[in-house]
Image: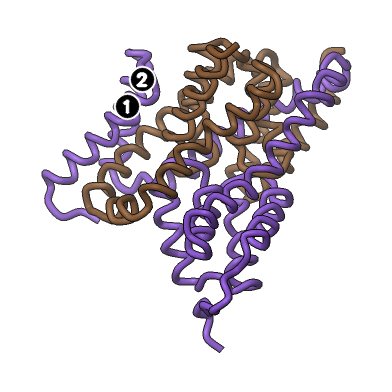
Chain colours: A purple, B brown
Amino acid sequence: MSSQAVQTKNPISLWTILLTFLKVGAFTFGGGYAILPVIQRIVVEERRWVSQGDFSDILIITQGMPGQLALNSSIQIGIRLRGTAGGAVAALGVTLPSVAILLAIAAYLYPLVRDNIYVQAIFYGIRPAVVGLIVIAAVKMGRNILHGWKGIILCVLLLAAAVISGAHPILILISGGLIGLLVNKRKGEST
Amino acid sequence: MEVILLSLYWSFFKVGFFTIGGGYAMIPLMEAEVIKTHGWLTSSEFLDIIAVAEMTPGPISINAATFIGYTTAGLAGSLIASLGVISPSLILLLLLSRFLTGLIQTPGAKNFLMGLRSALIALILLASFTLGQTAITDYSTALIFALILAGGLATKFNPLYFIAAGAVLGLLLFPY
């Protein structure tokens, strides 16, 4: 029993792809790194649509490109199964539950509870908690990404530049990328 | 109306395009576009939406796009904003997949991404500072922030638990 994906002669139906990714979109909380293990379990272990190796390749591309992790990996799996149509259907499946649920909250729930004193108390406590979560996310990303002084110095310099100039984040991101390109090229081989 | 829809689409397209690595990477862009440039939300509403997005299924920036789109321009707004945030992924993967796969694996792209991620961390820290100014307004909220930060750095619990803890502490400490 190899874990290689079995490419059957009968292609997987678009309907099956849609239902599978609807399930992924509807039952995974928290986005990004919480969703990826779920996709892996369903697509690699349960359905054997792609091999573990292929899934790892998909993750490498997912993390290096723009967009949501769950969305990008779903689209790539859809493409491998049924080409462009498969990718589009996978995107629809993983997105639709979020849109439907948030639409219901924005249209019905939020206006209903917004002015309730207890709801206000809850969000009074949740807001500083979310700020905490954002700092934690930055620290954890830093631990994974900023290897060595080069990365840390660049991070501090860009932080100073962002504070002083007030430049749009897109400018800071592109500057960071270009500096990374120049600094690492000059020093020759770098992994 | 059409103008609002167009600027919703374009703003969320930018958010989607520069959310590299997913999740909270969208926060600096969202803050710049949605709060500062267009004033579609206040900082505290933005924090509320991140919390709601964490509590509901699905990718965070799609959740946020749907919610902000709805509050800004109704049903059409929510669909357009969601389409905007997923458009970069659709375009890059469905149309430019082969080109992209080759490009990401070049050494140049790796170096570029390394620098970009340093920038991203700087921007997320900066965003947490400005958002913190609206969320941390007294001793109680400062305490909640400190507790969650310490808990999150020391443990590996799902963010959902920390939001629940924030909610309970909020109910207890709110100056009714």
Q: Chain of mark 1?
A: A
Q: Quadrant of the C terminus of chain B?
A: top right
Kindly indicate whether the residues beneath marks 1 and 2 are on one polypeptide chain.
yes
Give the camera-side residue of B1 and A42.
B1
Give the camera-side residue of A174 and A97.
A97
Write the residue at 50% across / 17% down.
B7
Give the image location of residue B134, x and y in percent: 62, 14
Write the residue at 51% across / 27% down.
B12
User: Mark 2 Cα within 10 Å, few/some/many (few <14, many 20+)?
Assistant: some
- Label 2 SS: helix
Numbered circle sitting on residue A162: 2
Are the residues at dot 1 and dot 2 in contact (C-beta closer than 8 Å)? yes
Write the residue at 60% across / 13% down.
B40
- Residue A45 higher or lower than B85, as above or below: below
Residue matched to label 1? A158
Q: Amino acid at mark 1?
A: Leu
Res A70 visible: no
- Residue A20 higher or lower than B78, as above or below: below
Q: Amino acid at mark 2?
A: Ala
- Label 1 SS: helix
User: How far apart, in angstroms, are the residues tagged by discs 1 and 2?
Assistant: 6 Å
Res A184 visible: yes
Give the image location of residue A3, x and y in percent: 53, 80
Residue B63 shown left or right of residue A110 in the figure: left
Q: Quadrant of the N terminus of chain B?
A: top right
Residue B164 shown left or right of residue A191 in the figure: right
Q: Quadrant of residue B52?
A: top right
Write the residue at 38% across / 16% down.
A163
- Residue A148 higher or lower than A173, as above or below: below
User: Mark 1 Cα within 10 Å, few/some/many (few <14, many 20+)?
Assistant: many
